[in-house]
Image (cartoon, rainbow, N blue to C red):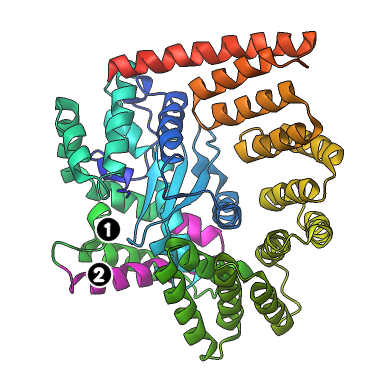
């Protein structure tokens, strides 16, 4: 489905990392770059292969945050709030979008043999964003061309699943101009390698992981012709580039990095999520059974976790619970939000409301920063029929996480159970707005206005929100005209 947006990087100077103090940045400010990335993300989130999976998303963001914490200046002078997410796709690929959005294919998760290899890819993509490669390519263009540019970048991202659409979108003059930039991406790749190595080194990861990952890619490419791995097509890999990385790490002391407890669990999760079809689940189960025979503790734990996920998706909550219990019994010292989350999911699927609520309450106290578990606790309150508590809790969570449409959906369900129709539609309106569906959000506000229980205060809130959304809608329509 996706092709990396880092394809479109412009030729870069070959010396030290630039400060970007040039005239181009005046035309594409960091604010506009972020806005461009958000426009693309709005459409990507609607794609069926975008994985809105909390445990996987939290793992990627935790790993990314650890890299950025070690090298805060990688956020750039704009101080981008990086967001990492997963895409359901067996192709080995990752990509960076303008403004700090980084996507990882499930295929790449499975190809990474250890956490340092995965960190090397994330660090490389952070390097693209930190150096503002896309911004530097389009810096000479006017800001009013950002919208058609966003459409073309999105077309590039959909190239694998819809090549005809992508070709049509790239047929215009601007599209051809972007296509010509493909010839100038190698220096950008080398620069991202250098930044990525610095981030890995200071983050405590094994820098040889980047060499090992790229070398394995290069070796596998010899078996391909036109079907080379996507990461090689979108991140041109040369012997010279690998040699440059090797030279840069030659003086590094060997640093063994122990994988986090969730690394193997998230690889297992990625395998299940990658192909949710009946045959896909069977294949995943077969793979996990093979792992159990290898007697490697971390992989056996991941295999049982994966088998529990498969059983749950096959509708067998009893077997899923038994497998999860086996996983926990294997190593009771493992503290993982992923294991806790799956336990809540299984109890909820089995309609064991009291168990689900107890597990969710314990998990949110143990993992207070987990958005996914916070959402599951709200769901458990709803399942247990504790609507008043659910409303209070969800409203508090929405103040903390304003960009989570799932919280608004749950709040709408809680209001519905209370018979509060106006508030139900107002919550649904916010959910649709967060998902980029402004017409649907306006429809929900209209229903809220007509609800018999809409108070004077509610009407005032609805009026103000309608004005805001209509202004956004007008901006969207103007954007379409520019395309």
Is residue 404 something that shows in the picture? no
Please state which of residues 316 and 209 is positioned toward the viewer in this rendering: 316
Q: Where is residue 427 shown, x and y percent of the image? A: 67, 28
Is 160 inside the magenta-drawn segment? no
Up-down relation of residue 272 to residue 327 (above or below): above
Q: Is residue 9 left or right of residue 119?
A: left
Residue drawn 50% across and 22% down?
Answer: 438
> Looking at the rendered structure, which numbered label has been put on residue 230?
1
Is residue 151 something that shows in the picture? yes
Residue drawn 54% across and 70% down?
Answer: 310
Please state which of residues 470 and 85 is positioned toward the viewer in this rendering: 470
| Quadrant housing residue 410 | top right
Q: Is residue 431 left or right of residue 175?
A: right
| Quadrant housing residue 213 | bottom left
Q: Where is residue 242 shown, x and y percent of the image? A: 28, 65
Up-down relation of residue 197 to residue 4 (above or below): below
Q: Quick one: SS at disc 2?
A: helix
Which span is picked out in magenta? 196-224
Distance CA(mark 2)–CA(mark 1): 12 Å
For label 2, the residue is: 218
> Looking at the rendered structure, which numbered label has been put on residue 329?
none
């Amino acid at each position: 489905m996706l092709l990396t947006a880092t394809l479109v990087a412009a030729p870069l100077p070959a010396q030290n990392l630039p400060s970007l103090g040039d005239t181009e940045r005046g035309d594409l400010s960091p604010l506009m770059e972020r806005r461009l990335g958000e426009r693309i993300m709005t459409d990507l989130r609607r794609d069926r292969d975008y994985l809105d999976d909390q445990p996987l998303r939290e793992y990627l963001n935790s790993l990314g945050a650890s890299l950025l914490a070690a090298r805060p200046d990688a956020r750039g002078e704009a101080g981008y709030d990086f967001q990492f997410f997963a895409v359901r796709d067996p192709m080995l690929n990752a990509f960076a979008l303008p403004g700090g959005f980084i996507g990882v294919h499930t295929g790449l998760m499975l190809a990474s043999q250890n956490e340092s290899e995965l960190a090397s890819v994330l660090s490389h993509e952070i390097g693209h964003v930190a150096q503002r490669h896309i911004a530097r390519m389009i810096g000479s263009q006017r800001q009013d061309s950002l919208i058609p540019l966003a459409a073309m970048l999105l077309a590039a991202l959909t190239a694998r699943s819809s090549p005809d659409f992508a070709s049509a979108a790239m047929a215009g003059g601007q599209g051809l101009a972007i296509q010509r930039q493909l010839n100038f991406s190698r220096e950008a790749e080398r620069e991202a390698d250098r930044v990525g190595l610095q981030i890995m080194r200071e983050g405590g990861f094994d820098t040889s992981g980047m060499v090992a990952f790229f070398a394995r890619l290069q070796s596998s490419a010899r078996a391909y012709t036109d079907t080379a791995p996507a990461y090689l097509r979108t991140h041109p890999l040369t012997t010279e580039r690998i040699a440059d990385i090797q030279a840069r790490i030659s003086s590094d002391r060997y640093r063994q990095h122990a994988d986090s407890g969730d690394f193997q669990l998230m690889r297992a999760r990625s395998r299940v999520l990658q192909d949710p079809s009946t045959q896909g689940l069977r294949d995943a189960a077969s793979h996990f059974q093979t792992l159990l025979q290898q007697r490697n503790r971390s992989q056996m734990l991941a295999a049982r976790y994966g088998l529990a996920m498969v059983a749950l998706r096959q509708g067998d909550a009893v077997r899923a619970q038994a497998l999860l219990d086996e996983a926990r019994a294997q190593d009771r010292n493992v503290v993982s939000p992923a294991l806790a989350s799956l336990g809540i999911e299984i109890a909820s699927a089995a309609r064991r409301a009291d168990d689900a609520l107890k597990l969710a309450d314990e998990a949110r106290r143990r993992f207070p920063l987990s958005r996914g578990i916070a959402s599951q606790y709200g769901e458990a309150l709803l399942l247990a029929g504790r609507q008043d508590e659910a409303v209070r809790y969800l409203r508090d969570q929405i103040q903390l996480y304003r960009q989570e449409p799932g919280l608004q959906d749950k709040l709408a369900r809680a209001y519905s159970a209370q018979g509060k129709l106006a508030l139900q539609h107002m919550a649904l309106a916010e959910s649709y707005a967060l998902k980029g569906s402004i017409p649907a959000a306006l429809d929900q506000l209209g229903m809220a206005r007509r609800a018999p229980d809409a108070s004077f205060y509610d009407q005032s809130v609805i009026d103000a929100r309608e004005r805001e959304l209509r202004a956004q809608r007008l901006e969207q329509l103007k954007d379409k005209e520019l395309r």
